[in-house]
Image (spheres, helix red, strand yellow):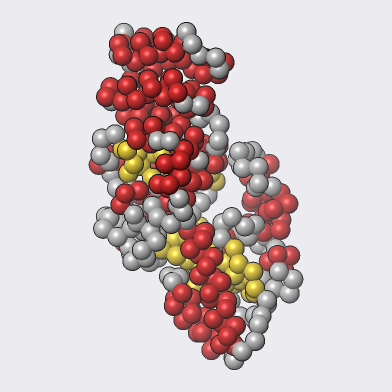
Amino acid sequence: MNPTALRRQIDQLAREVGFDLVAVTDAAEFGDDRDAALRRIDDNLMDGLPWFTKDRVRRGASPGELLPGARSVISLGLNYYPAGEDADGEDADATPPGQGRVARYARGRDYHRVMKRRMRRLVIALSEQLGERFAARWYVDDGPMLDRAAAARAGLGWFGKNGNILNPTYGSWILLGQIITNLPLAPDTPLRKTCGECARCIPACPTDAIVAPYVVDNRRCISYLTIEHKGVIPRELRPALGSWVFGCDICQEVCPVNRKAQATGDPNFGRRDLSAVDLIDLLEITEEKFRQRFAGTPIMRAKWAGMQRNAGVALGNLGDAAAVPALARALRTAVPLVRQHVAWALGRIGGAGAIAALRAAESTESDRDALSEIRQALADAAAYSS
């Protein structure tokens, strides 16, 4: 099959298995992107991600190391923007009272499984049509491949100043995957588009995580703090989390490119019951019921205690006194990590009920860090009440 016909076949098969975007680049090393990622590590901007190592970056920048004999990289994009939403995003104030927000990509099935199954089907179908097997390895964002670098060089999109890949049709609401192969495919041309002078995403970030155009401090990013981070959320950052309990979409919601983004019709994404979750229910859910409710979704990555921690912070930010009884119960029964954050929430809400719960816990708390949070929360409650 000649290269033009082969490429046409790949495009057709990719769309048949469920991908929205297809682009191709060669298997040359991603040198500039490798160097940029290594600088991020040296600057401590990737702290908290122990798996994001220099060795991983170097391997991920070299398709030929991941697949000996590699000649091409097929970059794939999957649109996940939920149908029925305004293209310019949701207003945080529209979130129902007592509800926590979940990033759009997590409102459905775990995309890693969805995309890997489709990539495998694509490779098998292409092999059958060619009548011969060829070498291929495929990755989503849990592998070493520099996915955004591949997408940008293939012309699937361009780098936004928030670090996301932007596409003219789907904006940044796309999930990326790559198939490295030894097939000789003609590469596409990178897009000439850029963000120009627009920098709306930078001041919009509540935690100031976008420290410069195209540079994100992972340690301050709400997505990191609510998902990958398993420990205590820094006190100074907690108010900026608002009602987010899993991920964050703010830098995407303010992006002008996303105003005309097309919605997906894929049933794997856009579950309405995950667009907002009841915070008190989340705070009080048992581990068994947590697993049952969120099985097969990305939310499992934050784990039970992590989501209860996040719920406590969100309740503190909402400041609704109706949450005090639930927070007080969690202060007695939850694991120490969660107790620290619900103590903070009670201190933020203040009032007689919150202060009484904190004083009762102070006399019985055995965990040193939780006790410190309780005492600080009592001081906060007194300050808010004065």
Split into 4 quadrants, where in the image is the N terminus? bottom right
Q: Quadrant of the C terminus?
A: top left
State whether residue 306 is above or below residue 259: above
Q: Is residue 232 above or below residue 139?
A: above
Quarter-of-image position of residue 59: bottom right
Question: Taking 322 as reference, is 183 left or right?
Answer: right
66 and 2: which is toward the camera: 66
Apparent side of residue 72 relative to residue 111 in the rendered image (left or right): right
Q: How many marks?
A: 0
- Residue 42 percent location from the top left of the image: 68, 41
Give the x, y percent position of residue 314: 37, 32
Image height of 344 relative to 301, above or below? above
- Residue displayed at 27% across by 24% down: 322
Q: Nearer the viewer, residue 157 or 1?
A: 1
Residue placed at 30% from the left, 11% from the top? 352
Q: Is residue 64 visible?
A: yes
- Quarter of the image holding residue 82? bottom left
Residue, x 36% and y 63% (percent of image)? 267
Q: Is residue 26 visible?
A: no
Q: Nearer the viewer, residue 5 or 196?
A: 5
Q: Position of residue 238 (x, y in %)?
A: 44, 29
**Which image quadrant is residue 342 in?**
top left
Please state if 79 lies on the left or on the right of 352 as rendered: right
Q: Is residue 160 above or below residue 157?
A: above
